[in-house]
Image (cartoon, rainbow, N blue to C red):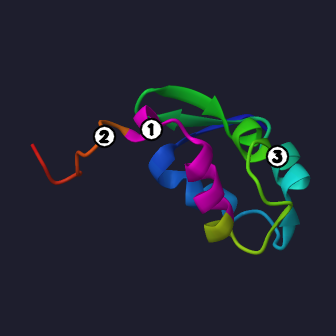
Amino acid sequence: MAQRVKYNRVESVLRELSYPILREDAAIELDETTLVLAEGEENLGGLIAQTDQEEYESARDLETEVNNVLPREAVGEPYQSEGEG
């Protein structure tokens, strides 16, 4: 089922997977999920397919790897904290 999820809610979506999980299986499971970023959108399954590890033990591990493949501007302005402004 197609869904859209904001970047700050991605861990809740990743928790729905059964772990351990292979990268390929996670990418397939989330292929219809759109990740809404500060600057645009990305297919979550596509991002997972770009990660380095073959298998993930937890949602936190997978989230860390997804963060590593996101472009810097995807999460907002560089060097800006949520508390500033």
What is the x, y in percent for residue 61? 66, 68
**Quarter in which the N terminus is drawn:** top right
Asked if 46 appears above or below 25 in the picture, the reply is: above
Q: Which one is nearer the viewer's eye here, 17 or 74?
A: 74
Tell whether 45 sits left or right of 61.
Answer: right
Asked if 52 appears above or below 60 in the picture, the reply is: above
Q: Residue at x 77, y 35 (%)?
A: 32
Assess whether residue 65 is covered by the magenta stretch: yes
Q: Which numbered disc, 3 or 2, marks the residue that appears first in the sequence?
A: 3
Q: Residue at x 76, y 41 (%)?
A: 45
- Residue bearing the label numbered 2: 78
Q: Are marks 3 and 2 in contact (CB under 8 Å)?
A: no
What is the x, y in percent for residue 34? 64, 34
- Residue bearing the label numbered 1: 72
Tag 2: amino acid = Pro
Tag 3: amino acid = Ala
Q: Which numbered disc, 3 or 1, marks the residue that appears first in the sequence?
A: 3
Q: CA distance from mark 1 to mark 2?
A: 7 Å
